[in-house]
Amino acid sequence: MNGEELTIEGRNAVLEAFRSGKTIDKLYVLDGCQDGPVRTIVREARKQKTLLQYVSRERLDSMSETKKHQGVIAKAAAYDYGTVEEMLENAEKKGEPPFLILLDGIEDPHNLGAIIRTANLAGAHGVIIPKRRAVGLTATVAKASAGALNYTPVAKVTNLSAVMKELKEKGIWFVCADMEGEIMYRQDLTGPIGLVIGNEGEGVSKLVKENCDFVTSIPMKGDIDSLNASVAAGVLAYEILRQRLNKK
């Protein structure tokens, strides 16, 4: 599925969307509305671990395109999400050690799209994003990816740290981008690797950083001390690619 981000309104339409297996990024429910049909929709949302937000009638009215939302509006992804298992299978099929990019709270759709594009070009097998406090696969993200979404799977997970622990058991280790880390040229970035890039303003969260095996940094000589998240991801992804090519 691709195209514009879908806005689904009305109780029957939203419930059918959940039950049909459509990927719903967010569900907005009228605050205080607790009747039977709405409870059923909320139950489906929680079952699928969809981000749920209770909002005012004014907020729903402003979001509504039909003005017949009946107290519920769902936002569906512009593209279908992939799975982490799919990424590992892709790496195995290519005979390559897994190379994953994990994004801790990227909120700018242009940054996410640019990172997906870079991931594809640098040979990463997929991108993993969290469900909360992060942008999903909107039409803007798809456009910024310049077609890479058709080739590079993006998985949306409930808990990044939990996924990292599971992947460590499969032999993947994680490097976190942070200004306090060792310069990337002095580190071995080959083998099965997960590159962790943090939020545009706050960087990688404490809990996620604690689950990384080590921290790496990009050398800088300018007057400011940080790079845009998508640029930092690009620099590090290509250093990983360079080291992989040199090891062959």
Image (cartoon, rainbow, N blue to C red):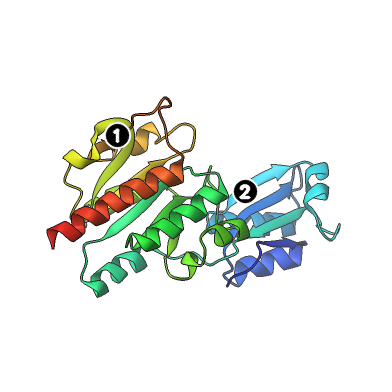
Q: Residue 122 or 223: which is nearer the viewer?
A: 223
Q: Is residue 156 visible?
A: no
Q: Residue 194 or 224: which is nearer the viewer?
A: 224
Quadrant containing the N terminus is bottom right
* Amino acid bearing label 1: Pro
The crowd level at tag 2 (other Cα within 10 Å; few <14, some 14-19, many 20+) is: some
Q: Residue at x 82, y 44 (%)?
A: 57
**In the image as oriented, which residue stretches furthest toward the top?**
223
From this view, report whether residue 105 is shown above or below residue 202.
Answer: below
Residue beneath disc 1: 219
Quadrant containing the C terminus is bottom left
In front of the other: label 2 or label 1?
1
Q: Position of residue 7 (x, y in %)?
A: 71, 60
From this view, report whether residue 78 is shown above or below residue 54.
Answer: below
Q: Residue 143 or 138: which is nearer the viewer?
A: 143
Figure quadrant of residue 89: bottom left
**In the image as oriented, which residue stretches furthest toward the left?**
247
Q: Is residue 143 left or right of residue 191?
A: right
Residue beneath disc 2: 52
* Amino acid bearing label 2: Leu
Q: Residue at x 53, y 42 (%)?
A: 133
Q: Residue at x 38, y 47 (%)?
A: 233
From this view, report whether residue 133 is shown above or below residue 168.
Answer: above
* Marks 2/1: CA–CA distance: 41 Å
Q: Is residue 16 left or right of residue 61?
A: left
From this view, report whether residue 121 is shown above or below residue 106.
Answer: below
**In the image as oriented, which residue stretches furthest toward the front?**
222
Q: Position of residue 224 (x, y in %)?
A: 43, 26
Whichever of labels 2 and 1 marks the residue nearer the N terminus, that label is 2
Q: Residue at x 49, y 44 (%)?
A: 106
- Disc 2 is placed on an element classified as strand
